[in-house]
Structure formats: structure tokens, C-alpha cells
Amino acid sequence: MKASMNMLAGLAVSLPAIAANATLWNIDLNSANGVTSGAGVVGSAGDQWNVYDTGDVNNALVATDSAGGNAIGFSFAAPGGNIFGFNPSGAPNPAELFDGFGSSQNNGPGSAVSQLSFTFSGLVPNTTYDIIAYGASQDGTDRGTLFFGDVNTPILAFTDGSSTDVTSAVNTSWDDFQLTTDAAGSFTINTNFNSNTSAQGPVNGFQIDGPAVPEPIAGTALALTLLAIRRRRSA
């Protein structure tokens, strides 16, 4: 009993936590579009999820945070690959989130060539964000996914695709890592399959956890107000 409790305690510690004063964006790659709600690895049951389907490929999309505000840009592409759907079955998949899709671009297992490419923009420049990436296909398969920050960089995270429970503490179908935005406030996540027998890598969704998107209009108004006050005091 004590050993079991210790094991559970270890699993609880391994789960990522939302940073204080952070904003959480939820992206659900699904078979339909719109908005749904539910809990992922981080967040709560009532969180909003932005849902995008394969018809949205190469489009400039807008994602809002889990509370419905703080919009950022989101787009994805499948260079040279054929997109297909994944529909994990069974009760463990919460609220039908993350049925997902993937691409069958065959560059050899583990190849660092982008199979699906996901770009987030409108974030705070030169800032590090916590990312949870989901990649789970149907139960009983060995399809998994490798995640790269760039096609020429080392693997950031991977999944083995064997579990349909996308929020399990045993993170076989999700992994977490960090990326830092460039000077324009963007970063790109590339993927490829992680399997010796299947050239299919599912991508179900992402959670992006970091500081709120800056509001330049509000910031400018505040700066002008402070400047006016300062001039008034100097007069």
C-alpha cells in the first residue's frame, strides 16, 4: 500500500503545472471545427478548446486562450504528406477531445523531416513557453509522434501512441517541453512519426502555457496617460 502511494505521489509530481499568472491556449485537432470544452493535462473541465480540422490546413487561424480571450495566430501545413484522421475509441478519451489527425509522409522512422508543421504567432517576443503536445492513435497500435522545434534540431518530445487516455499521468500519449519565441513572437513545432512499423504519426492537439499576449493599444494608452501626468506635475 505504501509503495503504491509513493508511486502515485511520483506521478502527481510529474504532471506539469500552470505557471502563476499564465495564460493557457488549447488547440484541438479534430474532425470538425468550432469550440468545445474540457480538461487536458493542465487546465480545468470548463476550459475552452479551439477546434481545427484538416480543411483548415495552410489557413491563417486565430486561437483564443482557455477563457476565451488573448487571441494568437495558429496555422499548420502538411508538406508532401497525406493527411488522414485518427479517432481514438473508448471512454478514456475525455469529452471526445483529441480525435486528431496525422500525415503519412514516409521519410523513415525517426527522420527529422517535418510531417506536419504547426506555427504559433502573436505571442510575447523572445519568451519561453511551456508546451504539452498530444499524439495518440487508436489503442493497440504502435503509432507515435516525434516533436521538433525545427527540422534540424534534436527531438524535443515524443509519444508512443499506444494509449487513448490523453490526460493520463503515465504520459505515453503526451509529452511536455519548452520553446522560446523569436523576435516576432512566433515559434514552429514540426512532427514526424515515431514507429518502426508504421509511417503514420498522429497529432491530436497542443496546450501552450505562458504569459498573456501583450496589448499594444492598451499599453500605449497607459504610457500616454503617465506621460501627461508627468508633464502636469512638471508644469
Image (tube, grey):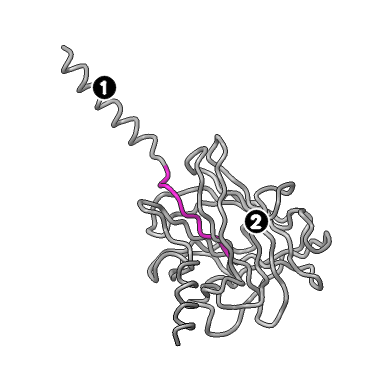
Q: Name the residue under label 1.
A: 227
Q: Does the magenta stretch include residue 207?
A: yes
Residue at position x 34%, y 30% in the image = 220
Q: Chief secondary structure of the magenta span?
A: strand
Residue sitting nearer the eye, 204 or 130? 130
User: Is 154 rendered above or below residue 9?
Assistant: above
The span shown in magenta is 205-213
Q: Is mark 1 on a helix, strand or loop?
A: helix
CA–CA distance between discs 2 and 1?
45 Å
Location of the C terminus by quadrant is top left
Looking at the image, which residue sits at the far bottom?
1
Counting residues from the start of the chain, the first of labels 2 and 1 encountered is 2
Left or right of 77: which side holds 1? left
> Is 39 inside the magenta-drawn segment?
no
- The residue drawn where x is 71% and y is 79% is 141
Residue 145 % position (x, y)? 69, 65
